[in-house]
Amino acid sequence: MRWRKIKTLIMGASLFLILSPSVKAQEIPSTHETGEQIEKILTDKFAEGKYSTKGADSCLMCHRKNNTVMAIFDGVHGDINNSKSPMAGLQCEACHGPLGQHNKGGKEPMISFGSDSPLSAPSQNTVCLGCHQKTEQSGWHSSLHNMEEIACADCHKVHAAKDPVLQKQQVSQVCTSCHTRQKSDMNKRSSHPLKWNDMTCIDCHNPHGSFNESALKKTSVNDTCYSCHAEKRGPFLWEHAPVTENCSTCHNPHGSVNDALVKQRVPQLCQQCHADDGHASRVVTPPGADAFGAGMGCLNCHSQIHGSNHPSGSNFAR
């Protein structure tokens, strides 16, 4: 019924269909060629340019019963009214390559995507990058994701009304499916509100790569932190060196078992640098015995540790 409705809308015009990354390998007739051999076959097919005259109508003769395949029409890639959509161009073959002899027995390979694809991740990604050339993707080729041969289809889902990784409620879930250490940190007692989706991984990082440290959107760690923690930016009359150098010297941005995301509790954190200047080098007494180990430790006195504008604030005590 759904296919009849689509066919009525297009009045005989060809449709475009992108085979879903989640289509299982057994749904596509298997071949004995290796990935390199398949790439060679596909390259030759592109050179010959034997595209179907019926577009997606040819593809749907076999694939229309697959609900995952048909879900392409629910998303932007299957919008026949959008001139930027593949559906308005070469349709299925815009992404999966020329049909050639594929519909005659199904043995001639087409470009497929996802973990079941015999093609390498870079080969799959060249298809996506043929259209997606925005500024956000400009750092992709030098990105860690590209170097690790992560395919676009590993994170993105094209055959869907909405791509999960583009939804705020699901971004962090997709990222932490690989970044398990960060997922663990997110669930520690002190963390940014990532697990409640009040923040997402892409608020700080560009997953498609950037020319900055750790694929950050901002030029430095500190600039990233200052975008929310503007009160720590300064400039201050009295500046604390590790604060101006790198916030992550003291803090773990993904989460910590200590208060305020600090890597170690105070005063042990402070003593990593202040080890030989009088009272700062003393052995910490049991909590509650004196001001050195009780409560906030060093911060009981040096409360303005991120910087001070007080004329007598050289020790960050006021």
Image: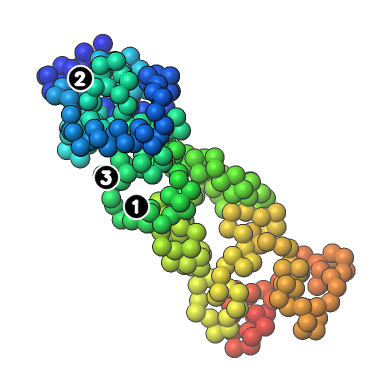
Q: Which residue is mark 1?
A: 137
Give the residue displayed 58% in from the left and 81% down from the top.
239
x then y, percent, for residue 120: 41, 39
Indicate the quadrant containing the N terminus: top left, top right, bottom left or bottom right. top left
Residue type beneath disc 3: Gly
Task: Tell me which numbered mark, 3 or 1, is placed earlier along the sequence.
Answer: 3
Q: Which mark sits nearer the N-terminus, 2 or 3?
A: 2
Left or right? Give the position of 228 relative to 272.
left
Task: Say above or below: 233 vs 152.
Answer: below
* First in sequence: mark 2 vs mark 1: 2
Residue 125 lies in quadrant: top left
* Res. 116 mark: none
Is residue 312 positioned above or below 203 on the image?
Answer: below
Residue placed under numbered mark 2 in the picture: 57
Q: Is residue 202 visible?
A: no
- Check if mark 2's residue and mark 3's residue have beta carbons within 8 Å: no
- Seen from the viewer's position, the closer of residues 93 and 208 is 93
Q: Amino acid at mark 1?
A: Gln
Q: Residues within 10 Å of mark 3 (few under 14, many from 20)?
A: few
Instruction: Tell me where residue 65 appears, x and y as whole percent.
Output: 33, 14
Residue projecting furthest to the bottom: 311
> x, y percentage for residue 71?
33, 24
Q: Residue at x 18, y 33 (%)?
A: 48
- Disc 2 marks which amino acid? Asp
Q: Residue furthest top?
A: 1
> In the image, is 316 to the left or to the right of 172?
right
Left or right, 33 with respect to 272, comes to left
Q: Callout 1: 10 Å neighbours few (<14), some, many (20+)?
A: some
Question: Circle 3 sits on which residue?
Answer: 130
Image quarter of the C terminus: bottom right
